Image: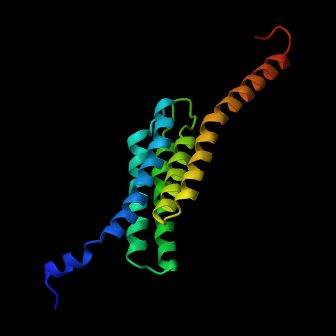
Amino acid sequence: MSSPTADLTLAMPDVAQIMRVGSRLLVAILIGALIGIQRELTHKPAGLRTHMLVALGTAMVVVTAAEAGMASADLSRIIQGVITGIGFLGGGAILKLTAEHEIHGLTTAAGIWMTAAAAAAAGLGQLGIALLGVVFGLLILGACVKVEKWLGDRVSRDAANRRPPGRP
């Protein structure tokens, strides 16, 4: 029978494990910070801290499962559960309805979900994939705003040109 102190001693990581796990968690935090800063700069409800916490929490769950030596099928189920749970968090961002019955928050929810996915990749040690995903995510969040504005302006002009004479 093992003592409580023996159990704690067995759980203490060595330097190599601390470096491996630490680098994965730090990349996850960076992922959350990059997306969170973009959301803060555009004055969105889920910003820096939210994205950093989602990323860190996701990576911690994945790293813990991977470091515990779980089989890939079990690890896959853990990741599925985390991604599903993050979907519910994002759902909360979407379900806030305005008086005009417009739904807002879809991009925020997608950003939270993408942050979790990138953090899961970082937690698995796939740092290049995680960072590449964030770069693509930031490009989408930044560049597509201009495209959406251009399309919106074009649709508005087209609608104005189709109005019957004498109508505002």
> Which residue is painted at 74% across and 29% down in the image?
151
* Residue 91 on image: x %, y %: 50, 49
> Which residue is painted at 44% across and 40% down in the image?
46
Q: Is residue 151 above or below residue 133?
A: above
* Residue 125 on image: x %, y %: 49, 65
> Which residue is painted at 51% across and 36% down in the image?
38
Outermost residue to the top:
166
Question: Position of 161 compared to 44: left or right?
Answer: right
* Residue 160 on image: x %, y %: 79, 17
Taking the image as drawn, is residue 43 in sight? no
Q: Is residue 151 above or below residue 10?
A: above
Q: Is residue 91 above or below residue 122?
A: above
Which image quadrant: the N terminus? bottom left
Taking the image as drawn, is residue 51 in sight? yes
Outermost residue to the bottom:
1
Q: Is residue 166 above or below residue 10?
A: above
